[in-house]
Amino acid sequence: MDKNTISHFFAVLSRMKYITRWGLMNNTKSENISEHSLQTAYFTHILTLIENKRFGKNLDTQRAALLAMFHDCSEIYTGDMPTPVKYYNPKIAEAYKNVEKFSTEKLISLLPDYLKEEYREIMFFEGKDDEELKVYVKAADKLSALVKCIEELRMGNDEFKKAKESTENALIKMNLKSVDVFMKEFLPSFYLSLDEQE
């Protein structure tokens, strides 16, 4: 087999399961970026669907979920940078953005040439309506973080108390109707045991 016809893209992508999140926190259960990306995709899909069904928008729910699936792929190379570090000051935030961009380009470079532009568009949110959809990916990303905080607090881990408060506040500040609906109709169930969810 010609090694020039082999693409390492999906083999490297599968390494997302080895990159853990919440590195500065004492976790009762570790969470990797593969798990987080799937949950973020679920949440992005439902947020955009709520916007369409309840509030008359015409968002591409499938495209939104796809963007969410790939939103943290750069962390394969960078790891998950803790939020307090990433946004400590504008210089660090800008430097990290550049590192993320480089990491994403490195990942895209593993693809065959005929697929590179397609994936670049997805991973850099370059589609026609992607800027609008990006808002929902960010909201879903925060909802996923909030769910993690709730799960940890339910296990008696007070380490996540402050993170929960700041994540909730960030979601409220986003002022998205679909987020309000999700937090009212879907989030309460995460506080319950499996038996209570029946």
Image (cartoon, helix red, strand yellow):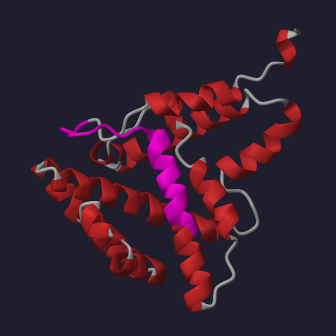
Instruction: State the quadrant of the N terminus.
Output: top right
Q: In the shown orientation, is residue 103 left or right of residue 26?
A: right
Nearer to us in this view, 110 or 100: 110
Position in image of residue 106 (x %, y %)? 65, 29
- Is residue 135 visible in the rendered image? The answer is no
Position in image of residue 167 (x %, y %)? 29, 63
Q: In the shown orientation, is residue 193 left or right of residue 143?
A: left
The residue under the point 72% across, 57% down is: 126
Segment tinted magenta in the rendering: 24-45
Position in image of residue 35 (x %, y %)? 46, 44
Q: In the shown orientation, is residue 13 left or right of residue 195?
A: right
From the viewer's perspective, is residue 160 above or below residue 129?
A: above
- Is residue 115 visible in the rendered image? The answer is yes
Nearer to us in this view, 130 or 159: 159
The residue under the point 63% across, 90% down is: 56
From the viewer's perspective, is residue 154 above or below residue 115?
A: below
Instruction: State the quadrant of the C terminus.
Output: bottom left
Nearer to us in this view, 60 or 94: 60
Q: In the shown orientation, is residue 119 left or right of residue 32?
A: right
